[in-house]
Amino acid sequence: MVNNTTLMVVVLLSIFVAGSQTKGDQDTVSHQNQASAIEKRTVFKEHTFISGNDVTLRCGNITDVKWTELIYIVWNISLQDRKCWLGLSPKLDNTYNDRKRLDNTCNDGKRLYNTSDGVSLFIPKISIEDEGFYSCDASYKGGSYMLNVSVSVSQLSTRLENENSRMIAVCEATYKKTAPTLHWEPAFNHSSNISSVKVGKSFMMENRVYLSDNLTINELTCVATYTSEFGSVQQKSTLYLTAGTRSKFCLKMKEETPTKR
């Protein structure tokens, strides 16, 4: 009788342990699935934009969310020397025909607008001052979504220099993330030198080409090509080689050339 009782206790204990282990495994899988779902709703991206262009940032797959399902959307922006944020939400009534702006502390032209593509952040004529980290936090019925974007702004300029009484066309590109390729248009057979150095938190790439005295073209255009996962974009800067520019430059070189005695 004792042996039977002992056997029954052992069996019941085994069933309890097995059930507890199964529940524990299910809880572990459940937590893993929840973590996976959270990771899928958080996206990180990097974008390089050309200085002077209007830029629109969209909050990822929030475009699939109906306006009536949106609770709020907020962009938190960390720039080089300051932080600001702006957001909006449907009015808390039954019409959903309008939107309620939560706030806009940026006060620099950035604004949110609602279109058929969702709620987007508009940055007019983006500049180096707009570089930073942009975080979109969107909450809607059934879930939430977060997008983190690292925004870099490229700059391109051209100028004339002289070296040993020779004219040099210089193309200078400033960037942070993606290094561009630089070339001149129209293409011509002149020796050139390409270099890149780090200046603070940015990089500076130069393409220097030596110009001959009998050059017949009146302008040179430097083309910077940036390639990313979203395709390639080009930025151009034109150097004008008019007769007046050449005369002034030659006069300047003559003044800087030491006279032999």
Image (spheres, helix red, strand yellow):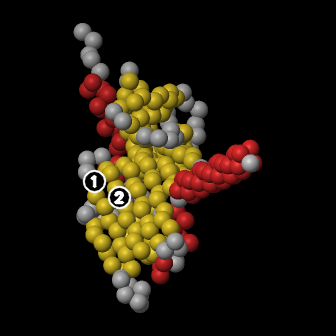
Identify the residue position indicated by label 2 in the image: 76
Q: Nearer the viewer, residue 38 or 252?
A: 38
- Does 104 sit left or right of 197 as displayed? left
Q: Is residue 138 above or below residue 98?
A: above
How far across and down, in percent of the image, does residue 104 sit?
Answer: 28, 67
Find the distance from the CA under tag 2 to the CA under tag 1.
8 Å
Residue furthest to the front in view is: 1
Label 1 secondary element: strand
Residues at circles 2 and 1 in contact by the CB criterion of under 8 Å = yes
Q: Toward the viewer: 122 or 58?
A: 58
Amino acid type, label 1: Lys
Query: Whole-percent x and y of residue 7?
Result: 73, 46
Query: Which of 148 and 205 lies nearest the eye of the viewer?
Result: 148
Decide which of tag 2 and tag 1 comes sooner along the chain.
2
The answer to whether any part of residue 54 appears in the image is no
Residue 149, horizontal then vertical, whole percent: 45, 53
Q: Which residue is mark 1?
A: 83
Q: Residue 174 falls in which quadrant of the image?
A: top left
State the residue in front, 29 or 57: 29
Q: Residues within 10 Å of mark 2 (few under 14, many from 20)?
A: some
**What residue sits 59% from the left and 32% below the top?**
189
